[in-house]
Amino acid sequence: MISGLLGKKIGMTHIFGDEGRLVPVTVLEIGPCVVTQLRTNPTDGYEAVQVGYGETKALNRPARGHLKRANASDVRHLREFTASDISDYRLGQTLDVRQFFQGEIVHVTARSKGRGFQGVMKRHGFHGGPKSHGQSDRARAPGSIGAGTSPGRVLKGRKMAGHIGNRQVTVRGLQVAMVDPDRNLLMLRGAVPGSRNTVLAVRHSDLESAAKAYVEMLTSSPPIPESEPALDPAPADEVVEQPKTTAESSTETPAGTVEGETAPAAEVAEEPPKVEAPPAPGQDVAPQEVAEVSQEEPADLVAERDESVDAQDEAEPKEEKG
């Protein structure tokens, strides 16, 4: 395992731990880093892995030629890290945040924010002079810087005003709160030097124990099955339904019935019977109408109606032909 990787600072946020407590964390984007060179004992006298991070377009020809050997794209930052076994790495290999795990202790190295030229109170934490007896201009003054005659000079290391910030700072003992391998994010408990987008290096505090824990994590986790690509279903042949004849429709057994049993008759809504007005006296009734009435009315009513019609016909006088 390599001792560290390059990344950049995203910013600060907070998460909630297992006990529901709010934890302030710093979000870092680690990698992806590309292996650009392998340092070996026969050629260089030591073993290390050189990785590149970031993208750039302004590279001179020597830098492009150096990256061309590793078949890597143009990277902005190069840094060397030691490794437990250099044979595990090859040129052009991509490294990401997966080598870190939750609960691990890491060290972060970055450049702090520049503060410019500051006084002794802000730079060294001096308390200032007394604010009484008319000393209006001695509140933030450094005070005496040494004796006069002996030694007659300012001793080295005297705390005085000067430039502060914009220097390489290493914060040790930060705990990994969360790892997001999908977005290459690493969340650390506490603050990290530098402003947003500052390039930094994250190193394992103990490389041997981190390598053992990483191997145990890989062996304990079940292998992820490779998802097979879904095959497109074969297009089904179009079937054109032929119109069924009356005989086929009558012999077809409806769903939900057993062969040999009679299918229940379909329920048909009954229409109310039509009531026709009785014929007027002297009006002839057609045989067809009588047949229709006989189907709907009882036979005794039809017989009485026929007798009344015959009696009316006999009672009417016959017209004499002129």
Image (tube, helix red, strand yellow):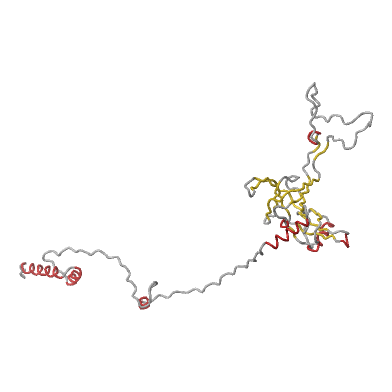
Q: Quadrant for the N terminus, please.
A: bottom right
Q: Nearer the viewer, residue 235 or 4?
A: 4
* Left or right of 290 on screen, residue 1: right
Number of numbered callouts drawn: 0
Furthest toward the top, the residue is 133
* Left or right of 162 on screen, residue 258: left
Q: Nearer the viewer, residue 116 or 219?
A: 219
The image position of residue 218, as x and y in percent, is: 70, 61
Q: Which residue shows up at 60% across the image and 68% down it?
A: 230
Q: Which residue shows up at 89% across the image and 31% down it?
A: 146
Residue 79: image quadrant is: bottom right
Q: Which residue shows up at 63% across the image and 66% down it?
A: 227
Q: Which residue shows up at 47% across the image and 74% down it?
A: 239
Q: Is residue 8 above or below residue 276?
A: above
The image position of residue 175, as x and y in percent, is: 72, 49
The image position of residue 273, as x and y in percent, is: 23, 65
The image position of residue 302, as x and y in percent, is: 14, 69
